[in-house]
Image: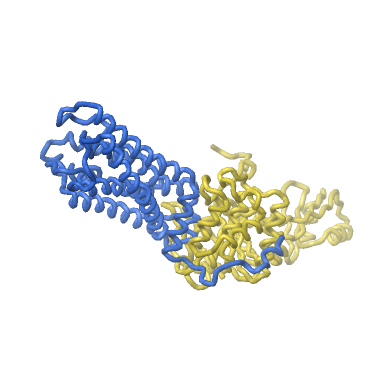
Amino acid sequence: MIEVTNLSKRYGDKVAVDDLTFRVRPGIVTGFLGPNGAGKSTTMRMIIGLDAPTAGTVTVDGRRYADHPAPLREVGALLEAKAVHTGRSARNHLLAMAATHGIGARRVDEVIELVGLREVAGKRAGGFSLGMGQRLGIAAALLGDPRVVMLDEPVNGLDPDGIRWIRGLLKGLAEQGRTVFVSSHLMSEMAQTAEHLIVVGKGRLIADVPLAEFTRQASRTTVRVRSPQAGALRDLLLGPDVTVTSGEPGLLEVTGRGREQIGDLAAAAGLTLHELTATEASLEEAFMTMTRDAVEYHGETDRPTVGSAR
Amino acid sequence: MTAATVAPPTLPADARVTGWRVVRAEWIKFRSLRSSLIMLAATVVVLAGLGLAFSAFLAGATIEPGTPAPPGGPSSLDPLGASLGGVNLAQLLIGTLGVLLVAGEYSTGMIRSSLAAVPRRWPVLVGKVGVLAGVSLVVLVPTALLTFGGGQAILGDEGIALTDDGVLRAVLGSAGYLAGVGVLGAALGALLRNTAGALTSVVALLLVVPGVVSLLPESWSDAVSPYLPSNAGQAFMSIGSSPDLLSPAAGAAVFAGWLVLLLGAAVVQLLRRDG
């Protein structure tokens, strides 16, 4: 169990994490979702005490991480950036980390085997690909057979096989009753692995919901209707729980009414339809909509190009 | 593949962090980096090679007493000074080793793994410095003794004996001084978290500052100069009293004081700053 309470982190004027409060429960995979720069990595660094909070507290199983006598038994963490000396072999890196807790070479070889690095365990970590580096980081996280596993963007740099392997590993770890906390900026990735979502943007909490509920809210169907009598049609369709928006003359976007219903209503009123298309909003779109206001670094394509004065 | 996670992990019942375990981990880190082994070997080669070379030079030359030593060479052209003449260059090598051990963790990101495993932090630095000092002494004490013996053998009748007044202290002192410079490099590496900056600081503190101080008005330079780390070290690495240097015991105390001061500052900063 990770408990984050009113957590804030400021770097000078810049607020990286802004009054975050949430809990990560054992037994399920919890996704930590947000655009780049939303404060996910900073929050994770504060959980294991690499960064000190400006305000608020973080505890792991009731104690500050640093107050645990065997921190690696408590939390296994893979942080986004590489955290390995490039001149040392993978096995020696793990042996040194394990030695701090009196963990021996047998466990080191177990985790090497588990992440599939046996052939390269004696090679310098500096020569590793991004994917191999991620596997080494995961091996280090699992050294102490920890109760909490926390991974920052673990699928980065992994090939499809590796990604599938990670998903299976995370679910397996959660099924064993561990707390599994995984960050990603990709909704699609979270939809595959997480049971619960904590969504952040600009350092603030946006949502703390089960994935199923997030999906239900997100996947409302929108129907595109084109009609020369759009105004009349609009008045006809409006009702409780129905929203109708119009992007251009003659075009309506309707949520809350199905395609058949719209067609029947129009026919009964004698209105002409030129188009009737149902579009399913993807989870990715739902996530984008939800975090739009909070996205810090808009890409060029997100910017309104018309009438932007510079 | 997930089946493998189900297998019971091979972990000791008392898996937790202890001081000695951190030291052991730092020893594994030390011996598993080629750069640390190379720097240590280079220190040994320079200390022994230059000591023997200066001794041979002294044996073959007729030198008027009081002739100043060549720059970068031994601090004095006497049998002891010649055989310990490699210290001046060797200190830069072992200082570099100290810097690399700590600053290398910051430049590669390894420090995050180190601090995640030992979140109380200070044992990491203390363990690292302990391993560095211990390994240095184990290697350099025999090197200094053998180099001294070899140098005196080359000098023959001109040579002095280890049993002569203060000689053993000076020879062991040179090994201790070098181990101390390694610690100084490690402390500066921890304070600056940057290899280039820390290396520059080591060179400045040991070589540049003494030169600059000697250019100050005499009353100032006389007051400051003996307390600089290199000159404090010189006080316990040489025999015979010099008006410019502290007594051997005072020199050792001042040198140790520098190490405590810099290490203390490094520990305080390690605890305060984000990792």
User: Which chain is the one coloured blue?
Assistant: B
Q: Is residue A24 left or right of residue B258?
A: right
Question: Percent position (x, y) of residue A271?
Answer: 86, 54
Q: Residue furthest front?
A: B157
Residue A165 quadrant:
bottom right
Image quadrant for the C terminus of chain B? bottom left
Question: Percent position (x, y) of residue A250?
Answer: 78, 48
**Residue A33 in view (yes/no):** no
Q: How many marks?
A: 0
In the depicted view, which residue is nearer to us: A148 or A97? Answer: A97
Which residue is at 21% across, 41% downward? Answer: B160
In the depicted view, which residue is nearer to us: A249 or B210? Answer: B210
User: Which hue belongs to chain A?
Assistant: yellow
Question: Percent position (x, y) of residue A69?
Answer: 47, 69
Which residue is at 65% across, 52% downward? Answer: A118
Image quadrant for the N terminus of chain B? bottom right
In the depicted view, which residue is nearer to us: B93 or B261? Answer: B93
Q: How is the image coloured?
A: by chain
**Residue A273 in view (yes/no):** yes
Q: Is residue B220 left or right of residue B36?
A: left
Residue A262 quadrant:
bottom right
Q: Where B68 falls versus A154 (above or below)?
A: above
In the depicted view, which residue is nearer to us: A9 or B122? Answer: B122
Q: Is residue A62 left or right of residue B200?
A: right
Question: Percent position (x, y) of residue A224?
Answer: 79, 52
Which residue is at 89% across, 58% downward? Answer: A267
Q: Where A57 falls versus A133 (above or below)?
A: below
Q: Where A308 falls versus A212 (above or below)?
A: above
